[in-house]
Amino acid sequence: MKPQTLQSALVFGVLSSTMLLNPLAVVQAQPSQGQLLASNVTFVPPKGDRPKDSQGGASRDDGKCPQDDKALNPYLTAVVPANVQRLTVQSQPSIFVYIPETTAEKAFFSLKDNKNGQHYQTFLPLDKKGGIVKVNLPADAPSLVVGNDYQWSFVMLCGDKLLPDDPAVSGTIRRVNSGANVTGPLNDWQQNPSLETADLLGKAGLWYDVLTVLMALKVEQPNNVQLSSIWSNVLKASNLDSIATQPIIARK
């Protein structure tokens, strides 16, 4: 037998023996469809000044409408970490809120600039079921100015009109220049999200952007256990344990 033929036979024999012992070995060696490469995503709080609001997530009053089931938890929650700046590089970023099961049919969202001027506002329809939602600033909304701070608020309308005692949460957001924060390439990350990009954004302290990427991935792969674990760990590390495993309500 020629050396090349002998070598081929030996390789085939090894593969055949391996498959006999473990017929799934060769299949398992291949990456599964939708497999995520990064093993973890870390949010590193940015250094420097802190937002005017010291708490993260807390709702005004009891966080539910009077007619809603008081036994259900958690209540209305802003998906923001406490005592750190919440940054974005986006001109029209996304805001995240946990909404409990509610009879309320709509909510009021408002974004004000650092002079308390109205930057953007809208009414939003609500799902009856509870979950974390993403509030998108539309493309025709005024762009956030780099370096400026903004205050957003989200109010559930318990009746037909907006009232002062309706459940509400609020948070801050500051737009920064991506070149000053991100060390690494950001290639079309909003259209092609990945865990590698999420980790890059997280290490740059860009709270709203890392959540934007992770939520996009979770909506795309709702049954991915690794991704669900990463999402939960990011929220838990930011003291958002009460909503870390709550479902996501996908919106267009």
Image (tube, rainbow, N blue to C red):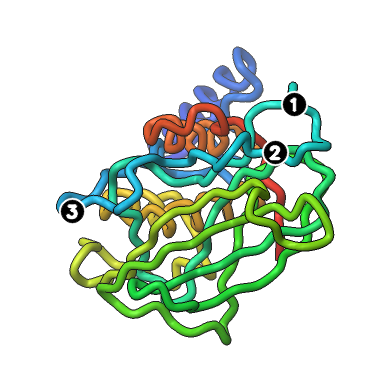
Under tag 2, what secondary structure?
A: loop
Residue at the extreme top: 21
- 78 vs 249, nearest the viewer: 78
Whether residue 123 is situated above or below residue 210 in the rendered picture: below
In primary-sequence order, the first of circles 3 and 1 is 3
For the C terminus, the quadrant is: bottom right
In the image, what residue type sits under mark 1?
Answer: Lys
Q: CA distance from mark 3 to mark 1?
A: 37 Å
Would you say residue 100 is visible in this rendering? yes
In primary-sequence order, the first of circles 3 and 2 is 3
Residue at the extreme left: 48
Whether residue 174 is situated above or below residue 99 in the rendered picture: below
Q: Residue at x 77, y 55 (%)?
A: 126
Badge 3 density bin: few <14, some 14–19, many ≥20, Cα 10 Å: few
In the image, what residue type sits under mark 2?
Answer: Lys
- 93 vs 55, nearest the viewer: 55
Judging by the rendered image, the residue that carries numbered circle 2 is 64
Whether residue 150 is situated above or below residue 133 in the rendered picture: below
Q: Is residue 228 left or right of residue 52?
A: right
Q: CA distance from mark 1 to mark 2?
A: 8 Å
